[in-house]
Amino acid sequence: MQKIMLTLFVTSLLAGCSTLGVYKVDIPQGTPLTQAQASKIQVGMSHQQVRFLLGSPTVSDPMNPLRWDYIYNYTPGTYAKKANIPAAHGQHLRIYFDPTGTVIKIEGLETIPESQPGLPGSKEAILNAPPL
């Protein structure tokens, strides 16, 4: 009898959690870039100029220091899904340098969107607070 009661209790707890749902947080991973930021990178720029414009790369391979990778994935959480904010996957910008530290090739510009989901369109949206 006790086993049946315990089984029913555990089953009702598990069913309650799946019915009510569990809060999930947004999961941004990597370096969020926009098309406006990525388009500023030009062949002939130095490491320092690229780092100033885009920030530190998501992946900087010590075995291949002549390639920087900027990768971004975004998985919306509970409130983002309710606000219909889409997920972002497959954003991968690759920048290749020559041995002197100058950009020689840029790949993946087509994977970078105009604006990032879950982020404001510009820094002004963050910096300008409404009056009290």
Image (spheres, rainbow, N blue to C red):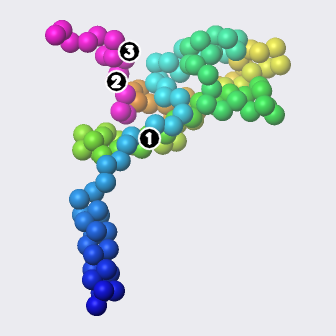
Outermost residue, front side:
2
Residue 116 position, x and y percent, is: 40, 30
Q: Which residue is mark 3?
A: 123
Amino acid on which the number 2 mark rests in the picture: Pro
Sequence-earlier tag: 1 or 3? 1
Residue 79 lies, with reference to residue 57, above or below; the image says below
Q: Name the spot of residue 91 as percent of width and height, x first.
A: 52, 36
Asked where in the image residue 67 lies, by quadrant, the reply is top right
Taking 38 as reference, is 23 above or below it?
below
The amino acid type of the residue labelled 1 equals Ile
Q: Is residue 100 left or right of residue 29?
A: right
Question: Eyeballing the image, is 95 above or below 71?
Answer: above
Rendering coords of residue 86 (x, y %): 35, 41
- Quadrant of image for the N terminus: bottom left
Q: Which residues are magenta?
A: 117-132
Q: Does the CB distance between marks 2 and 3 fall below 8 Å?
A: yes
Q: Amino acid at mark 3?
A: Lys
Q: 105 or 90: nearer the eye?
A: 90
131 falls in the magenta region: yes
Residue bearing mark 1: 27
What residue does disc 2 label?
A: 120
Residue 69: quarter of image: top right
